[in-house]
Image: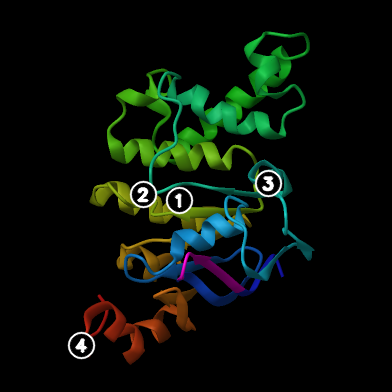
Amino acid sequence: MLLEVQGLTKHFGGVAAVRDVGFEVSEGTIFALIGPNGAGKTTVFNLITGILRPDSGFIHFLGKPLDGLKPHQVSAAGITRTFQNLQLFNGMTVLENVMTGAYLNGKTGFVRSLLRMPGINAEDKLISKQALTLLSEVGLESVADIPAAALPFGQQRLLEIARSLASGPRLILLDEPAAGLNSAETKTLAIFLKKLKQNGLSMVLVEHDMETVMEVADRILVLNFGEGISEGTPAEIQADPEVIRAYLGEDDQIA
């Protein structure tokens, strides 16, 4: 099993943001976490990536515990993520943003590259080529040389995903990747995620766009008030009365 989460619990004061949450993610699959606002989805991401420490429960990645690891150590282990609020280097070009992600696994590293220290030229060329390939996959190759801040919001979303992928992760956590995307960009994103899965990458997806979730996810866990209330395939989740009530407050199907 690639990722195993069991009994995950986190309190903020007297409020349980996450309570006894558990799920498993297999290699080469897309697992979705969905639920109303405040259900605890981003908190789960923060716990997995070491931004927060759980009060109880455990997280294993490739059979090894992530307990006590800092975010950069979790990233080095093979897990990367995107954020609800964009985290880009706005003063850098689109291409340079993706290259920073690749430097995490490079021999010379980002600081050595900035300082133009010996031994970086060959690696820079390779990383630049790989970054351009990723930009092409998300439709951003034509804007590679403009500042990231000049991109429309939807394209900035796609850029952040490309940068996260540049580090070569085994698992990527995507937090609202379709937020701010127009219809065409959302379709491009769904196609891209399915292609990544076909290439063996595993993903955990937090997303409010249910059409995208139902199209790309293999399994879904529904959270409500910090607790898991249902887990299953997209078809099973769409037909679950408890899930429908959590979302709509009535017996109607989730679109």
The magenta-colored residue range is 8-14
Find disc 2 in the rendering and name its residue.
188
User: Mark 3 Cα within 10 Å, few/some/many (few <14, many 20+)?
Assistant: some
Is residue 145 at least partly visible in the picture? yes
Residue at 60 percent of width and 58 percent of height: 48
**Does residue 11 belong to the magenta stretch?**
yes
Q: Quadrant of the N terminus?
A: bottom right
Where residue 33 appears, as percent x and y from the top left, is 46, 68
Foreground disc of the pair 1, 4 = 4
Is residue 218 at least partly visible in the picture? no
Find disc 4 in the rendering and name its residue.
250
Mark 1, secondary structure of its residue: helix
Foreground disc of the pair 4, 3 = 3
Residue at 36 percent of width and 49 percent of height: 188
Find disc 3 in the rendering and name its residue.
70
Prevailing SS of the magenta stretch:
strand
Q: What colour scheme does the image use?
A: rainbow
Where residue 255 appears, as percent x and y from the top left, is 25, 75
User: Mark 1 Cα within 10 Å, few/some/many (few <14, many 20+)?
Assistant: some
Q: Amino acid at mark 1?
A: Phe
Cα distance in 3D space between marks 2 and 3: 33 Å
**Does residue 99 belong to the magenta stretch?**
no
Cα distance in 3D space between marks 4 and 3: 42 Å
Cα distance in 3D space between marks 2 and 4: 33 Å
Q: Amino acid at mark 4?
A: Glu
Give the vertical position of 184 relative to 223 (above or below). above
Cα distance in 3D space between marks 1 and 4: 34 Å
Residue at 66 percent of width and 15 percent of height: 113
Find disc 1 in the rendering and name its residue.
192
Marks 4 and 3, the one that precedes in the sequence: 3
